[in-house]
Amino acid sequence: MELRIRQLAEPIGDELGLDVLKVSVGCGHSQLVRVIVDRAGGVDADTLERMSRGLSLQMDAEDPIQGRYRLEITSPGLDWPLTTRADFERHRGEWLAVHMCDGRTIEGWNRGATDGGFELEDAQGRRLDIRSDDVLKVHRAINWNAVAKRKK
């Protein structure tokens, strides 16, 4: 069922410049169909609404779900893990928190995917080549030091 909904969602997402990251279908009386989409620079509410309307029309026509369902189109939050080359390219230039296997957490600017990982630029301007094998989780974060400097 999720695969069929993804197949319906992806052409609509392509039209809107969105990547479909995940499709999930809950169970129960009124199933929740959640589609998570993203693009470089983030997704605004108008685009989410257009995606929702387009997919709703397709789902009504194709009827991939028996019975009632609720459709939710959303963007990933800051804590959504970056795992693929496309994730790192989509969020190039954004501030990341990198949780390493050795227990350290490193923060810095995402400078894009590399073979076997990604490059990070820390607050001191040092470029770090991070290997995916050394990482537990990577997600976008807020650079609070930069926020504090802007407020001054």
Image (cartoon, grey):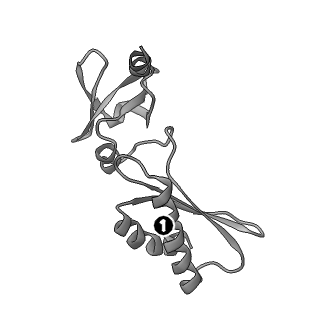
Q: Tell whether 111 sits left or right of 37.
A: left
Q: Amino acid at mark 1?
A: Arg
What residue is at 45 percent from the left and 60 percent from the top?
47
Q: Quadrant of the C terminus?
A: top left
| Front residue (pair 92, 53) | 53
**Residue 64: x %, y % from top left:** 58, 80
What residue is at 71 percent from the left and 79 percent from the top?
67
Is residue 138 visible from the viewing direction of this image?
no
**Residue 77: x %, y % from top left:** 52, 43
**Numbered disc 1: secondary structure:** helix
Is residue 101 visible from the viewing direction of this image?
yes
Residue for badge 1: 50
**Residue 104: x %, y % from top left:** 43, 19
Q: Is residue 133 above or below residue 20?
A: above
**Residue 99: x %, y % from top left:** 44, 28
| Front residue (pair 73, 44) | 44
Q: Quadrant of the N terminus?
A: bottom right
Q: Is residue 5 above or below residue 85?
A: below
Question: Which residue is farthest bottom?
Answer: 61
Q: Is residue 99 above or below residue 6?
A: above
Q: Tell whether 90 sits left or right of 59.
A: left
Question: Which residue is farthest right?
Answer: 29
